[in-house]
Amino acid sequence: MNIINDYPHAELSNLTRERLMTASTASLHTLLHKRGLKNTYIQGVGRMNDSQVKMVGQAYTLRYIPAREDLDVVAAFRDPEHPQRLAVESVPPGRVLVSDCRQDASAASAGSILLTRLQVRECAGFVSDAGVRDSEYAESMSMPVFCTKPSAPTNLTKHHAVDIQQPVGCGGVPVYPGDVLVGDGDGVIVVPLELADEVAEEAIGMEAFEDYVLDKVNAGAAVIGLYPPNEQAQEEYQAYLRRQETRG
């Protein structure tokens, strides 16, 4: 049985990837919320390592169901067709391996060896709604690792990997193969691929305006009328942009 599904999707453009690298998950959530998408933030998942490298990449999904004692024995990992091992060896460079573990962090979904293999294969990151073992090692990695918490038990005690590249749920959020995952210190946002270009473009202006507002607030300005901006604040911001353009 072929457990790696051929789920068709487009490729993220380099321009959109670069734009998303400068966008915060907070801004992206607001922009998606404006478009009616309210369930895009993966709940209960945070960045394990202190890497300041932003995570941006398309989803490569791995789905688990609850483990069963007669099947999920240590010898199961000797099977060359084991879905977890296949996922690690088949995920393309630049993708994010997303593990759907049903928000059960009582066991790990990966450890130092598998995470290192993903890093060596130039994956953009790892996201799981379960735990990660060998946490001190994971904290030292340059590849972004997002999970619920450190968890020592092997995944075999709780998780049975079943298929690859199918729609999954991670942290209560639907993730389709090819969706764009953006991760930073606030967590992980799932951007539907068909919205990625327009959201990434709009995020540039939003981030610039919020930087301007932050400078104003630091200088003593009140928030009311500034954020969100009234007509006067909008005019002042446009004048500011014109001055910046002249200086540039």
Image (cartoon, grey):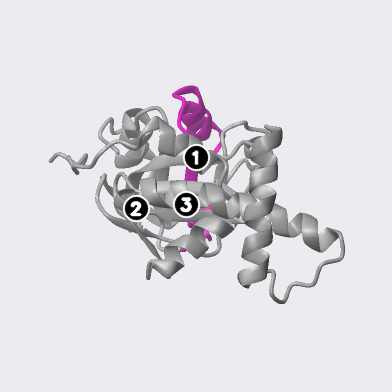
**Identity of the residue drawn at 75% across and 58% down:** 214
Question: Mark 2: which secondary structure?
Answer: helix
Q: What residue type is labelled 1?
A: Arg
Q: Residue furthest top?
A: 120
**In the depicted view, which residue is nearer to us: 232 or 64?**
232
Give coordinates of residue 108: x percent, y percent: 51, 50
Residue 84 within the segment the image draws in magenta: no
> Which quadrant of the rendered structure holds the N terminus?
top left
Which residue does the numbered mark 3 point to in the structure image? 202
Tag in front: 3 or 2: 3
Q: Label 2 near label 3: C-beta < 8 Å?
A: no
Q: Position of residue 139 (x, y in %)?
A: 67, 39
Alpha-carbon span between mark 2 and mark 1? 13 Å
In the rendered structure, find residue 195 and report the number of the disc placed on it. Answer: 2
Residue 105 magenta: yes
Residue 106 is situated, as x and y percent measured from the top left of the image, at: 53, 60
Please rate how many residues cluster around mark 3, counting C-alpha atoms within 10 Å: few if below 14, some from 14 to 19, many from 20.
Answer: some
